[in-house]
Image (tube, rainbow, N blue to C red):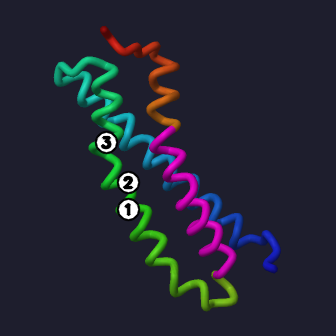
Amino acid sequence: DQPFGFMALLGALSLSGMLIKNAIVLMDQININIESGMKPYDAVIDSGVSRMRPVMMAAATTVLGLLPLLADAFFIAMAVTIMFGLSFATILTLIFVPVLYTMFYGVKKEG
């Protein structure tokens, strides 16, 4: 049992930055696909598929890189916050960013 202290708050702040970066990477790829002539619906689907591996690999390397901090009494709260938050939120980012993009921009499947 660890209290939610300063280090956990620092981990949550770091986590928010990582998640924003993941969303920006996905949104940027959608816009690049649309600018290259792809239909918006196809661009959203293709972006989700093509960016899944890089986003998952970045999250996995971060989680694995934080494993040694689990043995440190000072950094464990930050490490746990980032590791579990990033593991859960990366999956949500890959699902909800394309869904919210299609809802916000009114993207419909043609045909």
Say which amino acid is labelled 2: Val
62 lies above or below 35: below
Vertical placement of residue 83 versus 99, above or below: below
Give the CA distance from mark 3 to mark 2. 10 Å
The amino acid type of the residue labelled 3 equals Val
Decide if residue 111 is on the left or right side of residue 87.
left
Give the mark nearest the N terminus, 3 or 2: 3
Which quarter of the figure is the C terminus placed in? top left
The alpha-carbon separation of the residues under discs 2 and 1 comes to: 5 Å
Name the mark nearer the viewer: 3 or 2. 3
Q: Quadrant of residue 32?
A: top left
Q: Mark 1 — residue?
A: 58
Position of residue 45 relative to residue 62, above or below, is above
Tell which tag, 1 or 3, sits nearer the viewer: 3
Residue positioned 52% across, 28% down in the render? 100
Marks 2/1 in contact by CB < 8 Å: the verdict is yes
Question: In screen coordinates, is 1 left or right of 82?
Answer: right
Mark 3 lies on a secondary structure that is helix
- Residue 6: where, in percent of width, then height? 74, 70
Q: Main secondary structure of the magenta part?
A: helix
| Residue depicted at x 57% and y 56% | 88
- Circle 1 crowding by C-alpha within 10 Å: few under 14, some 14–19, many from 20: few
Q: Nearer the viewer, residue 5 or 92?
A: 92
Q: Identify the residue under disc 3.
A: 49
Q: Nearer the viewer, residue 92 or 79?
A: 92
- Residue 2 on image: x %, y %: 79, 78
Q: Which residues are magenta?
A: 76-95
Lower sequence index among marks 1 and 3: 3
Q: Residue at x 36, y 43 (%)?
A: 25
**Residue under label 2:** 55
Is disc 1 placed on a helix, strand or loop? helix
